[in-house]
Amino acid sequence: MTQQHTARRITATWQRGLTRRRFLKWTLAGTAGVAAVAAGGFALLRRSPLDEQPKPAWAEGLSRQEYHLFDRARVVLLPTEGTDLPATGEVPVVANVQKTLGFMAAPLREQLATGLGLFDNAAVVFHGRRFVDLDPATGRAYFDAWSRGNVVQRTLATVIKQLTYSAYWSDPATWSAIEFDGPVSEQWGLAYLGNAPLPDEAPDDGRAEERA
């Protein structure tokens, strides 16, 4: 699957889970929560040693915070130690994420950037440090909590996972370890037919936005 196909899938997931009203409501609430932590004298917790580390020159299109978030996500979500799989540091995971994001429409990409920032900073409230500074076990627990959260949290956790997993497994460097010789769609020249329909949600009773 190419980065362009992955971007279409990510777009479908994001649009499926979020409406503009729901996203704005959640963004305002999340920003207020992080601001409250800072106002309570914990502003230092929102700082990270990584803030002083620049992103690589090739990471154009990713903010410095986004680069460090996905660099942490690859470690948290793809534990390869003790397996025959190539280490995530040997696969251009973040570079592949960056290419995928480059295919997303500008308005949606801007929304996602806001969501990624809140995902990173919200960890301060629950774990006393940002996501980029969490150890792998705590980072996985954080993802698990968001996967059980409200629809915006679930959507954002899913999008980050999709970006990270596809960036790793779509890279040919990972294929030999699982005896995979490449997608048959490319070998057989099959045309891409788009995303399969996602399951329908429960009927909206008019209070879905309030519950989110």
Image (cartoon, rainbow, N blue to C red):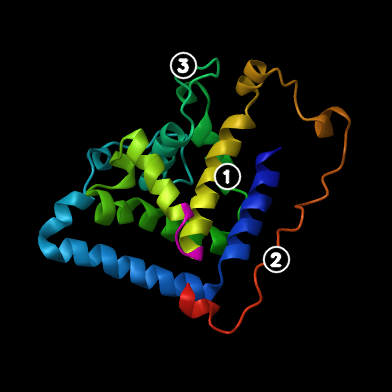
Q: Which is more N-terminal, label 2 or label 3?
A: 3
Q: Position of residue 185 (x, y in %)?
A: 83, 34
The quadrant holding residue 115 is: bottom left
Would you say residue 63 is visible in this rendering?
Answer: no
Specify whether residue 79 is painted magenta. Answer: no
Q: Kindly tell me whether residue 191 is visible in this rendering.
A: yes
What is the quadrant of the N terminus in the image?
top right
Which residue has dot 1 on it? 162
Distance, label 2 to label 1, CA atoms, is: 20 Å
Residue 14, position in %: x, y? 58, 59
Q: CA distance from mark 3 to mark 1?
A: 23 Å
Question: Helix or strand or loop: what does disc 1 sit on?
Answer: helix
Name the outermost residue toward the bottom. 206
**Residue 160: x %, y % from top left:** 50, 47
Decide: marks 3, 1 in contact (CB < 8 A)? no
Q: Main structural element of the magenta stretch: helix, strand or loop?
A: loop
Residue at image point 45% right, 73% down: 24
CA neighbours of label 1 inside 10 A, class few (<14), some (14 to 19), many (20+): some
Q: Residues within 10 Å of mark 3 (few under 14, many from 20)?
A: few
Amino acid type indicated by mark 3: Gly
SS at circle 3:
loop
Q: Amino acid at mark 2?
A: Asp
Point 36% across, 35% down: residue: 137
Residue at x 65%, y 41% (from the top left corner): 3
- Numbered disc in front, either 2 or 1: 2
Residue range in magenta is 147-151
Pointer 2 or 1: first along the chain: 1
Q: Which mark is residue 82?
A: 3
Q: Is residue 107 above or below residue 167?
A: below
Determine which residue is flagged by label 2.
200
Q: Is residue 69 left or right of residue 156?
A: left
